Image (cartoon, rainbow, N blue to C red):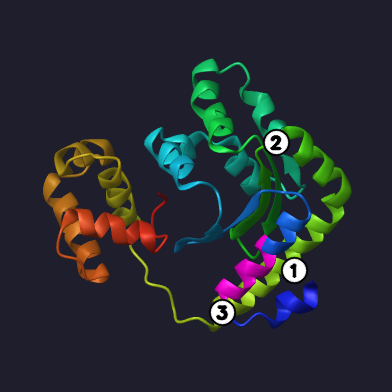
Amino acid sequence: MVDRLDAAQSREALDALALDYVRQAGFDGYYYIRYDTGVGFSSLDHRPPAWLDHYRREGLLHADPVTLRVCAEVTPFRWEEAFAGRRHDLAWMRRYLVSRDYGLAEGFNVPIHGNGFDRATFCVFGADTRRFQEALRAHRGAIKALAHSFHNAYERLHRSSPPPLTLSPREVECLHWAAEGKTNGEIADILSISANTVNAHMAGAARKLGTATRIQTVVKAIALHLILP
């Protein structure tokens, strides 16, 4: 499998190889997220779009124990290990654990730490708990090896790609809140800046993205993984 990943000539080919492997191993799918310091993130993600919409709508990113653990630790872990510290927060758990309704009952993350603050994670997931646990018992070591081989192949392809389009941190913040449905005035209050400054950041983002409207700018930023969906 390592040789096949190394020979992949595109992210699409890499994605197809990984997805076929994890499904043959008994998992329902995988996602890979590469966090780039000062740039944003890139990903290959097979989680259901409806779950990703719920995740964004409920603001789960900012308190997601899986993401926090990925950034803080290098040891692979199951989702339930990351959730353990949040069991007391019933309101948060009710919002997050509906993931089971979207076919995400179990997950196993392999954190990957690069230079500086760059991070990545490779995660397999499943809808059926018993089937997932059986697959993980049989293939845990193989998934850990796959994660690092996949990351190395992705890095190779990433380095050979054209330089990514980047937005300033303030442009990213403004677009994030715009995606949450906030007006420029509300964004100004949240970020403690003037409405004129928000207008300037939104205009700058639109210029870089080549878009004409606010909705187009937000949609394109999400499509390019410049902000989270």
Residue 74: x, y in percent?
A: 74, 50
What is the quadrant of residue 64 in the picture? top right
Residue sticking out furthest to the left: 196
**Residue 151 vertical placement versus 109 (above, below):** below
In screen coordinates, is 148 left or right of 117?
right
What is the quadrant of residue 35 in the picture? bottom right
Q: Amino acid at mark 1?
A: Ser
Residue 219: x, y in percent?
A: 29, 56
Q: Which residues are magenta?
A: 10-19
Cβ–Cβ under 8 Å for marks 1 and 3: no
What residue is shown at x 79% (from left), y 78% (from top)?
A: 3
Q: Is residue 36 visible?
A: no
Residue 138: x, y in percent?
A: 88, 48
Along the line of sight, the residue nearer the viewer: 14 or 37: 14
Q: Residues within 10 Å of mark 3 (few under 14, many from 20)?
A: few
What residue is shown at x 41% (from left), y 35% (from top)?
A: 59
Task: Determine which residue is flagged by label 1.
Answer: 149
Cβ–Cβ under 8 Å for marks 3 and 2: no
Q: Earlier in the sequence, mark 3 or mark 2?
A: 2
Along the line of sight, the residue nearer the viewer: 125 or 199: 125
In screen coordinates, is 13 left or right of 210?
right
Q: Is residue 180 magenta?
A: no
Task: Determine which residue is flagged by label 2.
Answer: 128
Q: Earlier in the sequence, mark 1 or mark 3?
A: 1
Q: CA distance from mark 1 to mark 3?
A: 16 Å
What residue is shown at x 71% (from left), y 55% (from top)?
A: 23
